[in-house]
Amino acid sequence: MSPKFVFYPNINSSAVNQLLKEIKSCKVCLPHLAQGVNPVVTAHPNSKIAIIGQAPGRIVHQTGVPWDDKSGERLRDWLDMDTSTFYDPEQVALIPMGFCYPGKGKSGDLPPRPECAPLWHQQLFDHMKQLQHIILIGTYAQAYYLGDKRKRTLTETVRHYQEYLPEFFVLPHPSPRNNIWMRKNEWFEREVIPELRNKVHALL
């Protein structure tokens, strides 16, 4: 079952700042993180859009800046969004499924740690009274938030993106590792990206 959101109208920025401090000091997953903890997340009570990604990569783990890599460049291009808007938490909240870099696996990064989303996501959403839309990037975010409403594959889920509107917009991961997927699914940039940009421009 996908999570349900309850938004509270009387939360101020100091409460969000305190919650973000708690997240930044979280060490729940420390025994599982070879590179140590460095939670990366941004949010604000006025955030209008939340982007739910996967987990920080190696570069983001070092810089502490979400989407500060090639994936972030492509994502901002998909959104047709400049960096100042993208990194303005009053406009966009950047919330990964796993807040810390999970480390390297045999074929890319390990999956995001499963502890973060159930521990922190709803607490963040409770404080974001202006939130109007959530962008779900990749399999992990879509599995958590869509539950049995998602399709058999990520490709099918993205192709049927309209079924999840107006609450969610579903996207593949913008990683360069997905270049082959992009070439095989040319309809994505032709049909989905214009609708994504229209949605984002209407909200911001």
Image (spheres, rainbow, N blue to C red):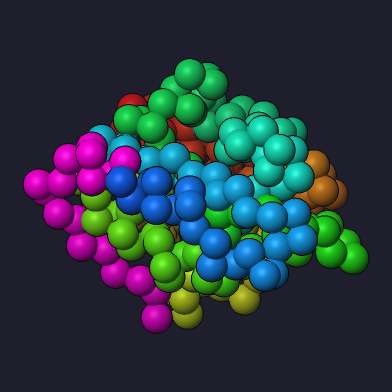
Q: How many marks?
A: 0
Q: Residue furthest right?
A: 106
96 vs 92, left or right, is right
**Residue at (71, 38) in percent of width and height:** 62
- The boundaries of the magenta stretch are 1-17
Instruction: Name the image quarter holding the C terminus.
Output: top left
Secondary structure character of the magenta stretch overall:
loop
In front of the other: 134 or 194: 134
Percent coordinates x, y for residue 48 in the rendering: 31, 38
**Residue at (17, 40) in percent of width and height:** 12
Answer whether residue 53 is visible to the viewer in this image. no
Is residue 10 a member of the stretch shown in magenta?
A: yes
In front of the other: 199 or 55: 55
Answer whether residue 167 is visible to the viewer in this image. yes
**Residue at (20, 62) in percent of width and height:** 6
Q: Residue furthest left?
A: 10
Percent coordinates x, y for residue 22 in the rendering: 39, 53
Residue 83's place in the image compared with 118, above or below, is above
In front of the other: 71 or 203: 71
Residue 180's place in the image compared with 144, above or below, is above
In front of the other: 179 or 183: 179
- Residue 36, quarter of the rendered image: bottom right
Percent coordinates x, y for residue 52 in the rendering: 49, 52
**Residue at (48, 27) in percent of width and height:** 87
Instruction: Name the image quarter holding the N terminus.
Output: bottom left
55 vs 184, left or right, is left
Percent coordinates x, y for residue 58 in the rendering: 76, 45
